[in-house]
Amino acid sequence: MKKFFGEKSKNRAFLGMTALVSAASIVFNGCNGKTEVKEFEKTVSLKHPTVQTVPKIDDENVESDKRIIYLTFDDGPNQGTENLLKILNKRNVCATAFLVGKHAYGSKRQKDDLKLLKSDPLIELANHSFSHAHNKYTEFYRNPEAVVHDFDIARDSLRLYDKIARTPGRNIWRLNNINVTDIKSSTDAANGLKKAGYKVIGWDLEWKPSQKMTLKGSHKAMIKKVDSIFLNDLEKTSRHLVFLTHDQYLRDTDSINELDLFIEELQKSNKFVFRKISQYPKINDILN
């Protein structure tokens, strides 16, 4: 029998459903708001908008016909960070920024962008290393102790007190219930991070760049990929999808609009809720 999208244990179709507005859905408004907004501005205002604090969302508050998406953005603060914040605040949707320590001090603009990131309640900050492996990944992961040290420097310099991390150039997971290493030569370094108390999280779906370092493809194509992952049970955790792209891909008008439309269409479908990565299942369990 063909499995319908969203059908994991119940024999019912998910595509095309019209979700009822309930008291539980109101809880999500701080992170999944659908308020009317003005036409998207193509220039980024220097004044950062003020938004309401996002409430914590517990598992029992997520209706069984919903799927949870974690928007994550790597390599900030970087070119495109302000555009990213503009989109998130326009849509009133939360996300997690995996920061690179050296980027936070690379220029005055990056320092200012770090302040914007830290002051925005829609954004959660996490560790993406200090050096980003100097973009020499094979060499970087050969020295597990140096990898841990690099993440420790980023943690201290950025004042990141929750040890949630993502490895540069690698899709690695080290949680109590998920152990995945995409390139096996990085195994010892990944295990070292876990031993040091880091909760390493990768991704289920990446919006990759074109050769011009802009978002490749359309928002409609990405939404089809989201549906396909849920339909075929390809998430690391059922009903939970970690989405990745990068700040620096959000510099041109087309990329900005495509990401904005991607989030808008997900919201309009009433099939999804959004969370920060610290709310991923079992991420806060004590590592063993």
Image (cartoon, rainbow, N blue to C red):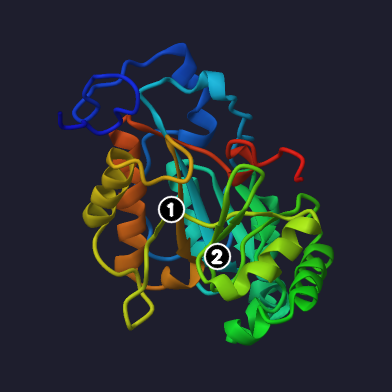
Drawn side of residue 188 relative to residue 123, left or right: right
Q: Front-most of 226 and 259?
A: 226
Give the crowd class for mark 2: few <14, some 14-19, many >=20 residues within 10 Å: many
Q: Quadrant of residue 235?
A: top left
Marks 2/1: CA–CA distance: 14 Å
Alpha-carbon neighbours of circle 1 within 10 Å: few (<14), some, or many (≥20)? some
User: Which residue occupies the foreground of this view, 110 or 193?
Assistant: 193
Q: Tell me the element at label 1.
A: loop
Q: Quadrant of the C terminus?
A: top right
* Residue on which disc 1 sits: 204
Residue at 69% across / 69% down in the picture?
Answer: 188
Residue at coordinates 29% horizontally, 67% vertically from top-left? 254
**x, y percentage for residue 60?**
54, 19
Give x and y (percent) for residue 22.
41, 13
> What residue is at 59 percent from the left and 68 percent from the top?
76
Label 1 sits on what residue type? Answer: Asp
Evaluate if marks 2 and 1 touch, with contact meaning CB atoms under 8 Å apart: no
Q: Is residue 42 left or right of residue 195?
A: left
Amino acid carrying mark 2 in the image: Asp
Q: Quadrant of the N terminus?
A: top left
Q: Residue visible at 52% across and 19% down?
A: 61
Asked whether the viewer can see residue 39, the reply is no
Q: Earlier in the sequence, mark 2 or mark 1?
A: 2
Visible in this render: residue 7? yes
Number of marks present in the image shown: 2
The mark found on residue 74 in the picture is: 2
286 lies left or right of 127: right
Where residue 259 appears, x then y in whole percent? 36, 57
Foreground label between 2 and 1? 1
